[in-house]
Image (tube, rainbow, N blue to C red):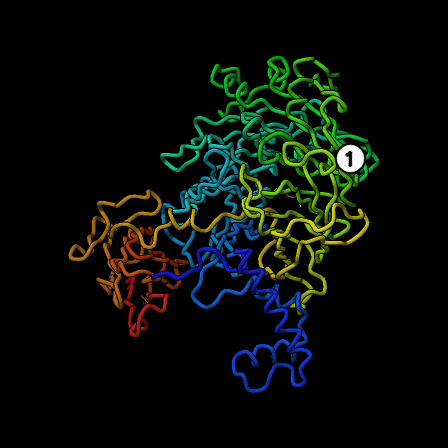
Amino acid sequence: MRRRSATPLWRNRPIMAVLVVTAVIALVAAACTPGGGGGDNGATGSYVDIINERGFTDEQVAAALKTYLPSGEWDEYVMFASGGHSGQVIAIGIPSMRILKNIGVFTPEPWQGWGYGNVEQQAVFDAGNVRGNEIRWGDTHHPALSETEGDYDGKLLFINDKANARVALIDLRDWETKQIVKNPVSIVDHGGTFVTPNTEYVIEGGQYANPLGWDYAPLEEYEAKYRGMVTFWKVDRDKARIDESRSFALELPPYWQDLCDSGKKVSEGWIFCNSFNVEMARGKVTDGADFEAGASAGENDYLHVIDLKKAEALYEAGKTTEVDGFPIIPLQTLIDEGVLYFIPEPKSPHGADVTPGGEYIVVSGKLDPHVTIYSFDKIQKAIADKNWEPDRYGVPVLDFDAVKEAQVEVGLGPLHTQFDDKGYAYTSIFLDSVVSRWSLGPPYKEGDEAWKLVGRIPINYNVGHIAAAEGDTVSPDGNYLVSLNKWSIDRFLPPGPLLPQNLQLIDIDQPPINPTVDVGGTDPNGMQLLYDMPLALGEPHYAQIIKADKLEANTFEIYPEIGWDPAKMAVDPDAPVAGNERVERNGNTVEIWMTAIRSHYTPDRIDVKKGDHVIWHITNIDLSKDATHGFALPGYNVTLSLEPGETTTIEFDATESGTFPFYCTEFCSALHLEMAGYFLVEP
Ligand code: RUQ
Ligand code: CUA
């Protein structure tokens, strides 16, 4: 049924070269012909006319051709972008940049019926409550696809909520959120989510320090009482859930840990997190200098180097204390047992990214124009040689020169780094508003070709993260890169003072043409900007881009059987099915078994009395692809999405008497408006 091009034409270099040359010749010829395109030769003339009329350059035409998907064709990749403070995850097709879905995660999402009545979803949300407070938004930052041997496997997706230190799990069989866990140690997070190469753990690093368990302590007691953390959430791959009972955290100094990445291949089993505010600034009121100045006062912050295998062994040996029943390995134990090391990193670092083979860790200093590259081998040697000085808490600080491999000048305000398949790294440059391409060292590039700046493509504007196709895995694809820009300023028609974000698609398929470029310049040197996408939702931070066929292999087209409960990912034996629809009263509890099919509910009249407790099961027994039915119950804050085969249960007290027509919210058939019924609550 489906139609898509296996390999887009323009990826096929020989064919494409011929086509481009032919097209360019045609364009040039057309442009030189009076009338711009050859009058009466039909279709050919018409597109040349359009190009001339709209004044497109060759480069613009090429960009359009590279992103255009004819009706019915599918994208080659899917990008999962954080929805920022929308609390959602956005799925975007690449190269078309068409939005496929906004997945409700920390925020109720009415179209998906996410969080509007379903009792199991309510339990997912409630697990994310903070000491009884219902939190119904999230500040999502870093999505993490599950991996097998360091490659995305298309099975699970994780994302953090910075605002409340929570992690969510989305099952990519149906692209629905299944679990939210609240971090018991910290009230905010940032350095997550990231997975280990076989998704044994999903990692959540902290950010703004707080006393463990965020109990009260005045800022004067910062050094003694405030702490940072990193949490290792154990992933049960069989159950597709985080197993809280096998998870643990590390107590870290209160150095505002920032972003983490997992070691891979040669560095598998190690975790790297950058940090800032090693100065331990406590703000203007306490210190006389605000956090901005105080946290940037020193020359260095610390890259945290963590031996996860050792940490795991300590956890299993019970060498832990507890906060709220959650095991934490104390800082002193981490020091004594050689789990934690620091490495100086240039001023106010951001981002810690491990190369595809795991040999190097790349760190950017927001106030330093270089990326700093550390060698994993050299780190191991420095640890073995005890080439360190203790920091104020006694954590060994490895000698910078002993572990540094290289520094490459890339521009002002470097942030995050991604990789391609040709030995190049890409770093977002916030202040210069460019993405810099630079070459890695051995084994990627040897001799003169190593550690060189080879391109700077301007973006509009203020880039934060970048995401390259499979660009943080062991095998990046090296064709597309998306720049996730914080400001859009003049790029779009302004919809009031709150402007959309701008995601820009960049073609990185072409290797550099010249050997180097100037650090102050804007020579893309082979890279091409293809597309601007206004994004009217939250502020996306990080994104990951996965090959679409990995998802297709795993995604349900419809639920596998009638009566499927997405919360359990199994058939509910008690689900309503055709023929067993009924209403039962038991004392003041009324239980309803209802089915939905084009274009009616059975039963379509429900009578209860005010004060009754209502348990209402509905199954969509329509198994045609896309035959989703909705269910809206006015006045009771209920909206459901019943996808083919799905069963759902809502539960509430009929607190309001009255006449409540319920109806289907999906335009499912010609008689969709007739898909309705009455819920009658007798006073
Ligand atoms: S952040 S712009 Cu990942 Cu939260 Cu760097
Ligand atoms: Cu079912 Cu409309």
- Is residue 23 visible to us here? yes
Q: What residue type is labelled 1?
A: Lys
Q: What residue is drawn where x is 40% and y is 34%?
A: 237
Secondary structure of the residue carrying tag 1 is loop
Looking at the image, in which quadrant does ligand 1 appear?
top right
Q: What residue is drawn where x is 59% and y is 13%?
A: 337
Could you tell me how many numbered marks the image carries? Answer: 1
Indicate if the residue with disc 1 has its beta carbon within 8 Å of ligand 1.
Answer: no
Q: In this view, does 628 lie above or below 234?
A: below
Front-lying residue, 460 or 471: 471
- Counting from the top left corner in percent of width and height, residue 31 is at 67, 78
Which corner quadrant holds the N terminus?
bottom left
- Counting from the top left corner in percent of width and height, residue 27 is at 63, 73
Q: Residue furthest right?
A: 288
Please name the residue that numbered disc 1 is placed on. Answer: 347
Which corner quadrant holds the C terminus?
bottom left
- Counting from the top left corner in percent of width and height, residue 510 is at 63, 52
Q: What residue is drawn where x is 68% and y is 75%?
A: 55
